[in-house]
Amino acid sequence: MKKPNQQPALHKVIMVGSGGVGKSALTLQFMYDEFVEDYEPTKADSYRKKVVLDGEEVQIDILDTAGQEDYAAIRDNYFRSGEGFLCVFSITEDDSFQATQEFREQILRVKNDENIPFLLVGNKSDLGEKRKVPLSEATGRAAQWGVPYVETSAKTRANVDKVFYDLMREIRSRKMEDNKPGNSRGKDKSKRKKLKCVIL
Amino acid sequence: MDFESPDVERDFPGLYASESGSGKRSQDSDFSDDAHDRSTKKELLIGKRKDKKESKKDQGYAALEGESSPEEDLDVKSPCKSKKSKSFKFPTIKEKREKSREKDSKEKDKDKDKDKEKDKDKDTDRDKEKRKELKSKLKLKDKKKVKVSEDVTESVEEMPVFGVPLSVAVDRSHCHDGIEIPVVVRNCIDHVQDYGLATENIYKISGIKSKVQQLRRSYNKREMVNLCDYDVPTVTSLLKSFLRDLPEPILTTELTPKFEDIACVKELAAREQELASLLLQVPTCNLTCLSWILRHLENVTANESQNKMSISALGSVFGPVFQTSTRVVTALLSHCGALFPNVKLVRYIPPLSSGCTSLPNTREAIAAELIKQDSLLNQIHSEMNHGYTVRSEELWEVQRFITLLKRKLRSLEKAQEASSQAVDKVDSVAEKSEHSATAAPSTTLSKIAPISPSNDKIDFQLQVWFTLLSSKLAKLAQLMHNLYPVFK
């Protein structure tokens, strides 16, 4: 595409997680400062917003995917083009936390990259009294994956901006790494290794 | 068969030795080192033995041949073959060829008749067989090569629309308003309908080849094409080239001869009826495409006074394009109105591009646009699932546009709901004040809600469903149309 070259940098973020954990709520809160109470399953939605990231104007593309398995077939197509992922679960629902493991694996499989920008997000932090997923367990899994863990509330807007901005920063630094010529830490190591194997 | 030849040699030793000996003296220089040593009469007998060995060698080659590659076989066999044919003196080469030809047809009979030449001829037969095998192998190789090169061109234009079966072309680039014909055909028809009907000798004059090629490439790559940038002959040539390049005639290979037969029927009513019943057997996507093109060509002939294209003139142009005769096209064209009474040319309005800033304003328009965008999105998904990844950018754009449309639709609905609630409130107020349920809305609220709002909402939902249903129904009708002869 020609346009993005002239326009500010574009970062592509994908929301993943089980159904009903609040992916759309987080997205809509970030995009339009609105909180939607009534639940309506998403098939797929995409948004674009201009934001100022550390003094630089950038664009963020957010793809809000379906949590339901029904749409798994089209999910790969989206995952492939994503640059960063917000993996969301509800702290009030253990199943949704367990499901993050599968989403993580699916993303790594499609992207073939261990270091893809990725945040583990525990949503519905305003419902602390209904908490089912202990903080320690969530931080433990995040540490195991080597990704940050943040708790948010789409209702109160707590940490909503933070997760999007943190992810954008990761994507940005990742892109800068990739663009450095001759940088061995650049674009996914696994691919480089593969190339070497072919040559040998 | 292979073990027979030594026995035959034993029966006729002198003959065999002298033949092969003399042959070797003159010809065999490159095949074996021993050949030249056997020039004296003394060595004739030895030569005979060696011949035995050699014939076994030949058999060895024959046995190996299946496993070695065709090129090797060629190299190894050609000297041996030439030796054999030249070493055999009694029949001339011509005679022998005739014989071996005869053998090809009546192999076994000949074998019994001619004991003397049996093994020799067998050898030549074997050689022939080998050559045949070689040829077939080479052909196979050639085919593989062709396939590979096709793959290469396909990877350049990953999922072409031109030169593929019509159903594939429709799958890859169909119109998103429910009319299942390739976009390129629809665009060409629209363009000629708009700008070309008065063009003199339209469809007869060819466009600029390079421009047609350029357009083909653009369509194959699904690039945005604006046919208004091109002249009418280029567009007509584009349409013709699409149809001509279909691997199968649009009337199908199977049915084309039947159409030829019917086209010869003199009596018009009978011809029309037979054409109609035969068209039922044409696959749906071919029939849809054909009907649109014929309806369009009918419009062209309707303007004959301006464009000078009569039915027969168009027939002679489109005969080769449809890969059939002029007569068939002329017949179809002259009965066009009766054959396709329900086909009406509708200008194709493609899905709005995602860069578009002015969204449709009414709920009906938004809903109709959403159906188109969904169809577009599905197509992108299916292409991506087939490994056509170029469009991932478009995927996000279309998705974003759909989200935008959905949001607008929802906000319109909410506004409507809110206004309807307001209407209800004012309604009840009006009822109380005027004690009249019917007069109030029409007088005080006609600007806000011309129709009863709740009904309006139902109407709208119905409309959305109706649009969906009607497209499904159209498909079903066509399916039934095709199945009709079966029931009959």
Image (cartoon, coloured by chain):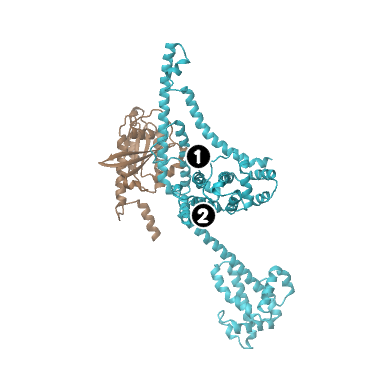
In the rendered structure, the residue with mark 1 lies on which chain? B
Q: Quadrant of the C terminus of chain B?
A: top right
Is A73 in front, or is B152?
A: B152
Residue B164 coordinates in the image, percent (x, y): 53, 52
Q: Is residue B173 visible?
A: no
Instruction: State the SS at label 2.
Output: loop
Drawn side of residue B191 relative to residue A94, left or right: right
- Which residue is nearer to you in this view: B236 or B301? B301
Chain letter corresponding to the colour brown: A
The picture places residue B42, in percent across and down from the top left corner, at 63, 88
Quarter of the image where the N terminus of chain B is located? bottom right
Q: Secondary structure at mark 1?
A: loop
Q: In this rendering, which labeled residue sits more in front, label 2 or label 1?
A: 2
- Whether residue A7 is visible, yes or no, is yes
Image-quadrant location for residue B41: bottom right
| Residue ranking furthest to the left | A55
Q: Nearer the viewer, residue B467 or A41?
A: B467
Considering depth in this image, is B45 or B470 the residue closer to the camera?
B470
Q: Amino acid at mark 2?
A: Ser
Please, is residue A176 above or below residue B412 in the view? Answer: below
* Sequence-first tag of 2 and 1: 1
Residue behind mark 1 = B177
Check residue B206 in the rendering and tell me which mark sits there, or answer none: 2
Q: Residue at x 51, y 54 (%)?
A: B206
Specify the chain shown as cyan.
B
For the residues labelled 2 and 1, the Cα–Cα distance comes to 31 Å
Residue B241 badge: none
